[in-house]
Image: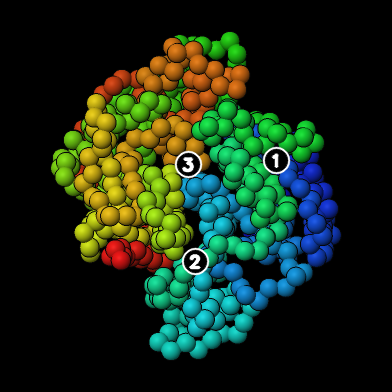
Amino acid sequence: MTALPVQFSDDQATAFDSVTELLRKAGVDLDDGLLQPPRGDAGVMAVIGKAGSGKTLLLAELYKALEQAGVEVVSGDYESRKKGDDRRTLAILAPTNKAASVLRLRGVPATTIHRILYTPVYDPEYERIAEWLAGQGDKPAIEGLTEEALARAAAFYEKNKSIPGALAAAGLRGSDFITGWKRREEPLDIGFVDEASMLDDRQFEDLKEIFPNLVLFGDPAQLAPVNQSGSMVFDTLPEPQRLILNRIHRQEAGNPILDLAHALADPQLGFEDFERMVEDTARRDDRVVWGQRVEVDLMARSPVLVWRNNTRIRLINAFRAVHGAPEDELIAGEPLICDGIELPMKHRKKRLDLEARGLIKGAQVIFLGSGRKPGFSRLHVMGAEDPQVSAASIVKIEKPDEEEPFIPYAARMGATFLHGAAVTIHKAQGSQWDTTQVFAPDIYAAARMGRVEAGQPLWKRLAYVAITRAQERLIWVVRNRLAKPSGPLQVDDLKAVPAAALTLEVQEETPA
């Protein structure tokens, strides 16, 4: 069946034409499908719009047009050494694994910004398989791999366009074919960056060094990065380089979650009026729920969104208590949030290994169990293409009214984690869940404080970001209560995911 052509809104069509002109100046003519060698920097452009304005649709259509024109997509999981000066490339990036996975679910081959900064080094023998899968070499004969295994790899790659996933489908482990990681030395070509409101100035400068042609896609109503003075990187761009999208009522009509989010733009709307609006919406549409308690069953996969740290810590400890989690250890199924990597500079390779597997600051992780060595954890990185990892871990469980966190797992060095049953709204940016719980008493506390950020009441920015994390269903929790769990925590659904699971044991080194 032939797919119907996409019908753009007027501002989407204008934005598409503007980006097309930017690319034409860079030597990529989408109208005629002509590619010329790279010829200098075309510059930076931003496509800006609130939730429901069609940014993701526009990004997806631009990607399809570039691919049809013959532009090579760089995924970050493999790059051929057979490079020509004339080739044109595109990388589609997001700040977090979760944000990248949202795009991948829509057929857009996105990866994280960090994964583009560092590239894998492949074992030469298995690189021949990668070259073949990428269409740049003949089918190889590899000792120990049958024709059936290579066929599985080809079928997986045809559907998913992931080299590590394809090799895992053939029965190989990551340690078989990836020998290390290296910092990108050469610039790329065209970069699309989703969730650009999350970028700080340093990341923006890094991206401009790598990509001479850069298009940002961002939401101006979200929260600016911490220590960014309430501004976003695209705020500084000249007016012609900022393309504004408005909400597409034709496509998003009847979405109560987006209706609530956009209602926050009314300068006359107060918190009490907004809550009445939420309650009225919940009476007529089951996609919005007026919640009398936090649903604990959802917290293992979809954290409660809060503003205040003390609220977050209280909810985490309540979650652990109702599941009977002992204080001195984690139980399988507990959610974690990566808080960074604690490794000295001399262990740079280990840091790259961990970060390349998706253990970057803010990554959502599910604890699967203890590793084979003390301090090691088996983990599932949510949204990562190769989600299963085993790594040295430092897990911190914060306690109410206590300055120092309790540490049930502590390797001498490795990836650090906080509990993830509840997260701040700031940390939730870039992520989405089918059902999202928002702890309304925290939004009310922000409203009472009267704080303003970039000319907008802080409570409205918090409410907007929190609400738009919900893809299908929003629960606006109005009482400080926790429901009882319907059963124990589960991990079976995670263990059954992709045959592409990779393992990474980051060994601790003994002191010299």
Q: Can you identify the residue that label 3 sits on?
A: 431
The residue nearer to you, when weighing 74 against 399, is: 399
Depth-wise, is mark 2 or mark 3 nearer the camera?
Answer: 2
- Up-down: is 292 above or below 471? above
In the picture provided, is 202 more to the left or to the right than 314?
Answer: right
> Split into 4 quadrants, where in the image is the C terminus?
bottom left
- For the residues labelled 2 and 3, the Cα–Cα distance comes to 27 Å
Q: Could you classify mark 3 by the number of other residues whose Cα lies within 10 Å: few (under 14), some (14-19), or many (20 or more)?
A: many
Q: Residue at x 38, y 35 (%)?
A: 423
Q: Earlier in the sequence, mark 3 or mark 1?
A: 1
Task: Please give the name of the residue rendered at 43% of the width and 89% of the height, measured from the top-left corner.
Answer: 143
Amino acid tagged 2: Trp
Counting residues from the N terminus, which is met first, the one under dot 2 or under dot 3?
A: 2
Q: Is residue 4 visible?
A: no
**Which three-letter amino acid code belongs to the residue tagged 1?**
Ala
Where is residue 21 shown, x and y percent of the image?
82, 48
Q: Nearer the viewer, residue 273 or 281?
A: 273
Q: Earlier in the sequence, mark 1 or mark 2?
A: 1
Q: Position of residue 94 (x, y in %)?
A: 56, 48
Q: Position of residue 128 (x, y in %)?
A: 55, 81
Residue denoted by label 2: 181
